[in-house]
Amino acid sequence: MSQFSAVQRSSSKRQSTADDVSASSTPIKRHDSDRSSNIGGSLQFEFISVQELQGLLQMHLATPLPECDEMFPWLHSYSTTPPPSFPNAVSIIRSQPMSEGWIQNSGILRCSLDPHDFLMTWGNDKNQQFRHCDRNESAIILREVMIRELAKVKEVVNEDDMNDAVQLCLQYNVLPFLTTDAYARETYGLKKGCTVSNSHQAAAVLTPKQPGSFRRFDIQSAKMLEMSPAIVIYCFEIADCHNFSENPCRKCNQMAKVLRIALNLIQRSYSEKKSFEVDIKILKYASIDEIPKSLIGTAPMSTTTLNKITPQQLVSQFDVESFNNWERGLLYREQLEMSKMSSASVVEQSRSVWCGNCTDYQVYKLLKKCGHLNEGQPSHPPCFSTENSIVKLKNIKFSPDCQEAVDTKFFNITNPEKEWSMMIRCTESAAPPSLEKLWECLANALNDRISKPAEFNFPSSGTITLGSLNINSIKVILNTCFIIHQLTSMEGHGVLIYCSDGYTETTFLLVSYLIFLWDLSLEDTLVRLHTEFQRPFFLFHMDLQVLGHLQTLLRNFSPKRTENAALFQSPLDGQLQPLEITPEMFSKIFLFRIPAGSDFSNLKGPLPSRILPHMYLGSLEHAQSPELLRKLGINYIVSVGENLSWVETSNQRNRASSSPIPTPASKVMSNFKSRNRGFSMENNQKNNCIEENQSNSFIDFFEKEEFKILRVMNLGDNGKDALTHQLEHILKFIGECHDNNGKVLVHCMVGVSRSATVCIAECMKRLQCDVLRAYIFVRVRRLNIIIQPNLMFMYELLKWQEQQLQGREIDWHIICRSISELNTNYI
């Protein structure tokens, strides 16, 4: 699909954060290898062979990540102290994308970074004086900055090397500073308005002021560079000038020089003196063919691999090859997973009305035009099924002869039993359709001479408020439900209600129709839609308010009521008239009061998100509604760091014999040397993730009424409290729920960090996948809410994965880069 391909074939460009931090400057010399340490003369860099790089990378990935207490709080913020020791670490940097005729986002080695991943950027801020209309003036400013800053660390760069560094910075709109450089952030950060000019006035060094966020995924690539004793730079430039037998690659040398300068400059921010050794080398190869597959993330691919052989083909060769590289394009995978999770499904018993996403709409129209609708399936697994996911797909082979099989791996292709003769798109920008438009679409849908489906737009969820309701707008809502019913009551006619993600914008219209169709209350409609038809949906608070008042009117006109039979005559006789609303009916809408005891009216969503068949992820508000949990069949609760007000204190020690009582000293992470990772009920030992913090978290298990409850006490979302020392015990409790065919709600305060971390771990266990795949699986199914496990929780999960899966396939900084790229699209 075009919108997916556009996302994945473009080069990755990251936005730098705008936080401003300062640090005191302490000159520290960073020693490179002999050939690259001649900073006063021309910088020279040694070559490294493909075989040597392969050995370095294998050793790097086989070396366990440093322990939590060594990495935190250093990973949380800009660098004001030297990096922790990480023996055998290697960073790989791509100096430039592929040239013309090749796809830029191909030709990528494993674990590799681009300049925007770790260097401060300046090209997107109009206040930056580096951003000058005259390129020569920008070059002068950059040169002055480099000379001034290098002088502070008593370094001198010759003219040729300075020109090379300036040229690369201009090309990529970057500065010669790592994104973790506290001094550079304070002096040249975006929020400073950039007072830099071509004068020699030095910026003042201010007191360091570290940001308070514990989710700095954006700076972890630079953190890895700081820790790496070996750095390898490469590119796959396909050109005659890229001939190592005669001249080294100019762009790789420029990148090496900028990196050499950046690594020297960051040491101004370190509060203590320490010598480092970093070896910057450039990858040398005679032919791309000599590079082993174990080193390649995405092979160099020409633009011809974007071509599709047949009109109905959905996935190109490049789509397949790039999909196999999970280190890149997480936004593309999120969109694919979303299209799978929310793919079209029936929402009522006649199997005539469907709800889906824009991909369903596009694929249906394409295959119908090409005469290939029979390639689809009449139904797909529910949204929470592990079979309805791309997460478990690995090493897909592209085959032009079996293209249909490849397409169905990426997309759920639907072949409805009744063709969709009407398609309704719900979108935020849509105005309510007129009654004339509704009747025109109904007539077109019933006209056999018109081959195209009738289409119209409808306002999305969250756009219709109580204040905007009037007789005309309510009449449009009611009659939209009316024509959907009338059309689908005719043989062979179906309706698709769709939006971009398949649930956020469609839910208001969908629920309105089902209240009208089923003659059920709002709460009963939502429960039935969730439990019987297993459709993902999300209602905003204003939707619950509006539907709470409209439900009586919608039910009064329901086709299930015998007194309304005369209203629902066949639309073919030409006498079908719009349903009318009297002023008295309109007045009664606002007199209706939602019952005070309603569990749904004040809940966000209003339901928790179903992640797996046996597991829900939600908030404290959901957990505080036991009646709601009963309706959903939930009988287990995991409370991560929060208390339930409806649980009596006197019952908190009423422990059941079926409880997974922990055994002392059962370790989860054996590589945490000399540390007791025991799962005792009360663990008052020192927190091994933050040396200064005392971990007083403990697990309390009890039963209240028909619920089994496991509560993790004294665990905050503060970037200090560790979770993995209780994780195995929590997963054992969830496993008991799974084995007993129960359902468990995992919650914290909001349902985005502590409880989301537990759900990611459970998905890693059930899907037998790594942390990044499990993260995407949970993220997509936490409906309309972005999960945000803090940095330390994600690090703990990767350490846990190292123990569970005996290693890591995707490295820490690559995971963080992917999460950061995702979040910049929403936050």
Image: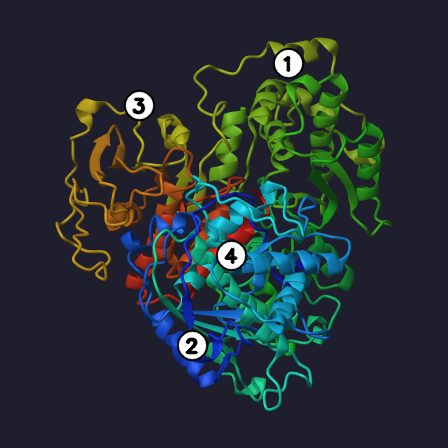
Q: Earlier in the sequence, mark 1 or mark 4?
A: 1
Which of the two discs, 3 and 2, sits closer to the camera?
Answer: 2
SS label for mark 2: loop
Q: Residues within 10 Å of mark 4 (few under 14, many from 20)?
A: some
Spatial CA distance of label 2 from label 1 is: 78 Å
Spatial CA distance of label 1 from label 4 is: 48 Å
Q: Are marks 3 and 2 in contact (CB under 8 Å)?
A: no
Residue found at x 31% / y 48%? 738
Q: Nearer the viewer, residue 140 or 108?
A: 140
Tag 2: amino acid: Ser
Q: Earlier in the sequence, mark 1 or mark 3?
A: 1
User: At which x and y percent is residue 270?
Assistant: 39, 53
Tag 3: amino acid: Ser
Which of the two discs, 1 and 3, sits closer to the camera?
Answer: 3
Which of the two discs, 4 and 2, sits closer to the camera?
Answer: 2
Q: Earlier in the sequence, mark 3 or mark 2?
A: 2
> Looking at the rendered structure, which numbered label has been put on residue 589?
1
Q: Is residue 313 visible?
A: yes
User: At which x and y percent is residue 575?
Assistant: 84, 28
> Looking at the rendered structure, which numbered label has been put on residue 645?
3
Spatial CA distance of label 4 from label 3 is: 38 Å
Q: Which residue was labeled with disc 4?
A: 818
